[in-house]
Image (cartoon, grey):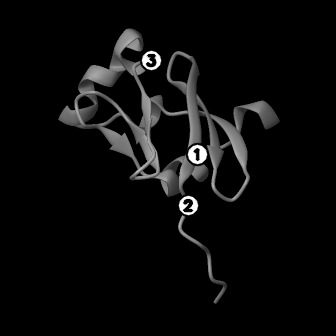
Amino acid sequence: MTFRPILDITYAVPTSDFCLRLRFSDGCVKEVYVKDLLQGPIFEPLKDPNYFRQVKLDQECGTVVWPNGADIAPETLWNLPDLAAA
Protein backbone atom coordinates (compact mmCIF):
# COMPACT_ATOMS: atom_id res chain seq x y z
CA MET A 1 0.00 0.00 0.00
CA THR A 2 1.36 3.42 -0.98
CA PHE A 3 1.31 6.21 1.58
CA ARG A 4 -0.45 9.33 0.34
CA PRO A 5 -0.01 12.52 2.37
CA ILE A 6 -2.98 14.58 3.44
CA LEU A 7 -3.82 17.15 0.79
CA ASP A 8 -4.45 20.82 1.42
CA ILE A 9 -5.55 23.47 -1.02
CA THR A 10 -3.08 26.36 -1.04
CA TYR A 11 -4.71 28.59 -3.68
CA ALA A 12 -8.29 28.91 -4.91
CA VAL A 13 -10.08 31.32 -7.23
CA PRO A 14 -13.35 31.01 -9.09
CA THR A 15 -12.79 31.15 -12.85
CA SER A 16 -16.32 30.86 -14.21
CA ASP A 17 -19.70 29.54 -13.12
CA PHE A 18 -19.05 26.58 -10.86
CA CYS A 19 -15.36 26.30 -11.79
CA LEU A 20 -12.40 26.73 -9.45
CA ARG A 21 -8.70 27.03 -10.19
CA LEU A 22 -6.88 25.26 -7.38
CA ARG A 23 -3.34 24.56 -6.27
CA PHE A 24 -2.83 21.62 -3.95
CA SER A 25 -0.09 21.03 -1.38
CA ASP A 26 1.32 18.25 -3.60
CA GLY A 27 2.02 20.87 -6.31
CA CYS A 28 -0.86 19.85 -8.58
CA VAL A 29 -2.74 22.76 -10.21
CA LYS A 30 -6.20 22.10 -11.64
CA GLU A 31 -9.27 23.85 -12.88
CA VAL A 32 -12.31 21.85 -11.82
CA TYR A 33 -16.07 21.99 -12.38
CA VAL A 34 -17.90 21.42 -9.11
CA LYS A 35 -21.61 21.96 -9.86
CA ASP A 36 -22.27 18.20 -9.76
CA LEU A 37 -21.02 18.17 -6.13
CA LEU A 38 -23.55 20.78 -4.97
CA GLN A 39 -26.05 18.37 -3.43
CA GLY A 40 -27.99 18.92 -0.21
CA PRO A 41 -29.27 21.94 1.70
CA ILE A 42 -25.86 23.37 2.67
CA PHE A 43 -24.90 23.65 -1.01
CA GLU A 44 -28.19 25.14 -2.24
CA PRO A 45 -26.96 28.79 -1.99
CA LEU A 46 -23.87 27.89 -4.06
CA LYS A 47 -26.09 27.16 -7.06
CA ASP A 48 -26.36 30.95 -7.45
CA PRO A 49 -23.25 31.90 -9.48
CA ASN A 50 -22.83 35.16 -7.53
CA TYR A 51 -22.82 33.30 -4.23
CA PHE A 52 -20.53 30.61 -5.61
CA ARG A 53 -17.93 33.30 -6.43
CA GLN A 54 -17.74 34.18 -2.71
CA VAL A 55 -15.51 31.13 -2.23
CA LYS A 56 -12.54 31.65 0.10
CA LEU A 57 -9.52 29.59 1.01
CA ASP A 58 -9.55 28.45 4.64
CA GLN A 59 -5.84 28.07 5.26
CA GLU A 60 -6.36 26.52 8.69
CA CYS A 61 -8.53 23.72 7.27
CA GLY A 62 -6.72 23.61 3.92
CA THR A 63 -9.85 23.74 1.82
CA VAL A 64 -12.35 26.01 0.10
CA VAL A 65 -15.29 27.43 2.06
CA TRP A 66 -18.28 29.67 1.50
CA PRO A 67 -19.93 32.18 3.87
CA ASN A 68 -22.68 29.73 4.87
CA GLY A 69 -20.11 27.17 6.10
CA ALA A 70 -20.21 24.91 3.05
CA ASP A 71 -16.89 23.32 2.13
CA ILE A 72 -15.57 20.59 -0.13
CA ALA A 73 -12.81 18.21 0.89
CA PRO A 74 -9.49 18.70 -0.93
CA GLU A 75 -9.35 15.00 -1.84
CA THR A 76 -12.75 15.25 -3.52
CA LEU A 77 -11.61 18.26 -5.54
CA TRP A 78 -8.27 16.64 -6.40
CA ASN A 79 -10.09 13.64 -7.87
CA LEU A 80 -12.14 15.77 -10.28
CA PRO A 81 -10.96 15.97 -13.91
CA ASP A 82 -8.76 18.93 -14.82
CA LEU A 83 -10.68 21.10 -17.29
CA ALA A 84 -7.43 22.64 -18.53
CA ALA A 85 -6.19 19.22 -19.61
CA ALA A 86 -9.32 18.44 -21.62
Residue at (81% x, 37% y) in the render? 85
* Amino acid at dot 2: Leu
Judged left or right of residue 30, residue 39 is left
Q: Position of residue 80 (x, y in %)?
A: 60, 46
Give the farthest residue toward the bottom: 1
- At horizontal 53% and vertical 68% (from top left) the residue drawn is 6
User: Which SS class for mark 1?
Assistant: strand
Q: Which mark is residue 53?
A: 3
Q: How many residues crowd around disc 2 within 10 Å: few (fewer than 14), some, or many (20 or more)? A: some
Q: Earlier in the sequence, mark 2 or mark 3?
A: 2
Secondary element at tag 2: loop
Q: Residue 15 versus residue 36: which sits nearer the camera?
A: 15
55, 83: nearer the viewer: 55
Question: CB of mark 2 within 8 Å of CB of mark 3?
Answer: no
Picture layout, residue 51 above or below residue 3: above
| Residue 50, horizontal then vertical, whole percent | 39, 10
Helix or strand or loop: what does disc 3 sit on?
A: loop
Q: Nearer the viewer, residue 83 or 8?
A: 8
**Image coords of residue 58 (percent x, y):** 41, 42
Q: Is residue 75 above or below residue 58?
A: below
Q: Identify which amino acid the numbered label 1 is placed on.
A: Thr
- Whichever of callouts 1 and 3 sits on the residue coming sooner in the sequence is 1
Task: Give the spatial CA distance, label 2 vs label 3.
Answer: 23 Å
**Disc 1 crowd, CA 10 A, few/some/many (<14, 14-19, 20+):** some
In percent of width and height, residue 15 lies at 61, 19
Q: Kindly report which numbered mark, 1 or 3, lies closer to the viewer in this rendering.
A: 1
Residue 86: in sight, yes or no? no
